[in-house]
Amino acid sequence: MKKILLILTLLCCSTPFIVAQEQQKKHYSHEEYCKQQQEFITKYAKLTAEEAKQFFPLFFEFQKNKWEINKEARKRTKKDNEQEPTAEEYIKLVNKIADAKIKIAQLEKSYIEKYMKIISARKILDVQRAEDRF
């Protein structure tokens, strides 16, 4: 009887770990994420197949460039933040982050000009809204 109780207790205790491992396997790859994002944006912004075909290579190029800028800003802040920063270093850190945001805004503006050659301004706004909702 004690053996049965011990086995049941072990099974009950190990179940959360088994479930957690199964849930961890359900993470999306970057490609799957991009595919679902593209489908969502296409539907939400009502892009035609031809518009989507021309638009998304530029959209994902912009996303990659934006990610690189953010990556560089994060790397700088981590590098500068290995030990407790001084007040002056905090000022530099805040300015680096602000500079990265400005760079991204300038990059976005340049891509919007490219998008306008493919889709209307209204659809660009719908794309931006869809991206926020996704």
Image: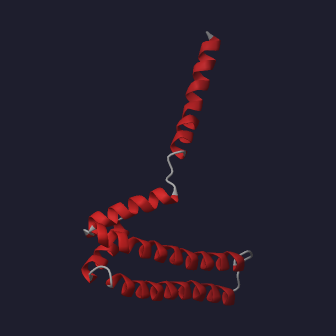
Q: Residue 46 is drawn in which quadrant? A: bottom left
Number of numbered discs visible in the structure rendering? 0
Q: Position of residue 23 (x, y in %)?
A: 51, 43
| Left/right of residue 113 with respect to residue 82 in the rendered view | left
* Colour option used: secondary structure
The residue most toward the top is 1
Q: Position of residue 120 (x, y in %)?
A: 26, 81
Q: Is residue 50 above or below residue 2?
A: below
Name the residue located 58 percent from the left edge and 25 percent from the top edge.
11
Name the residue located 32 percent from the left edge and 80 percent from the top edge.
118
**Figure quadrant of the C terminus:** bottom left
**Figure quadrant of the N terminus:** top right
* Front residue (pair 27, 74): 27
Q: Residue 121 is drawn in which quadrant? A: bottom left
Name the residue located 64 percent from the left edge and 12 percent from the top edge.
2
Q: Position of residue 81 (x, y in %)?
A: 69, 77
Q: Position of residue 5 (x, y in %)?
A: 59, 16
Name the residue located 52 percent from the left edge and 55 percent from the top edge.
29
Q: Is residue 98 above or below residue 84?
A: below
* Front residue (pair 8, 32): 32
The residue most toward the right is 83
* Front residue (pair 71, 116): 116
